[in-house]
Amino acid sequence: MEFQDKTLRCVDCSAEFIWTAGEQLFFADKQFKNEPKRCKNCKAKRATRMATASAPRERVETHTTCSACGKETTVPFRPTQGRPVFCKECFQQRKFAGAGGV
């Protein structure tokens, strides 16, 4: 199959870009099914955004009181108002109690 350069429109910036015959051949060799949706600039910007978004988040430690036993505990999240918070021991007990008889 002979490929020819093809003009596509970027979904992000709406600019036209050329999808070269060589790029099409590469896509065919890799058995990619979809045409590219973004121009090279928008693709690079998106890759940068995705790389920074996947950076590890800072862990939140919240000191609170267990809703079951009343013990002071630390949890790795900010509790939501109106929802119970459990210490590790009570959480494990509830987890295993719910696993067998649902």
Image (tube, grey):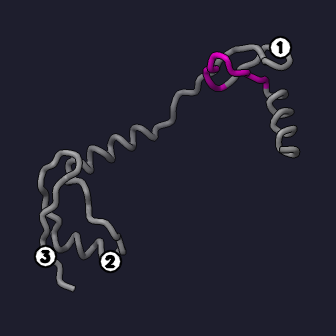
Q: Residue at x 29, y 71 (%)?
A: 27
Task: Report if the CB atoms under discs 2 and 3 are less than 8 Å apart.
Answer: no
Q: Position of residue 59 (x, y in %)?
A: 58, 27
Determine the secondary structure under disc 2: helix
Placement of 62 over or under 88, stated as above or below: above
Question: Which of pointers 1 and 2 lies earlier in the amino acid sequence?
Answer: 2
Question: Which of pointers 2 and 3 lies earlier in the amino acid sequence?
Answer: 3
Q: Which residue bears the numbered disc 2? A: 29
Q: Nearer the viewer, residue 33 or 23?
A: 33
Would you call the spot at circle 3 few (<14 residues within 10 Å), some (14-19), or many (20 or more)?
few
Question: What amino acid is at disc 3?
Answer: Gln
Would you call the spot at circle 1 few (<14 residues within 10 Å), some (14-19), or many (20 or more)?
few
Question: What amino acid is at disc 1?
Answer: Gly
Q: Which residue bears the numbered disc 3? A: 4
Q: Residue at x 27, y 44 (%)?
A: 45
Q: Which residue bears the numbered disc 1? A: 70
Q: Position of residue 80 (x, y in %)?
A: 62, 20
Q: CA distance from mark 2 to mark 3?
A: 15 Å
1 vs 2, front mark: 1
Q: Nearer the viewer, residue 29 or 90?
A: 90
| Segment colored magenta | 76-87
Q: Quadrant of residue 67?
A: top right
40 inside magenta stretch: no
Numbered label tally: 3
Q: Quadrant of the N terminus?
A: bottom left
Q: Residue at x 24, y 76 (%)?
A: 25
Q: Position of residue 51 (x, y in %)?
A: 39, 43
Q: Quadrant of the C terminus?
A: top right
Question: What amino acid is at disc 2?
Answer: Asp
84 inside magenta stretch: yes
Determine the secondary structure under disc 3: loop
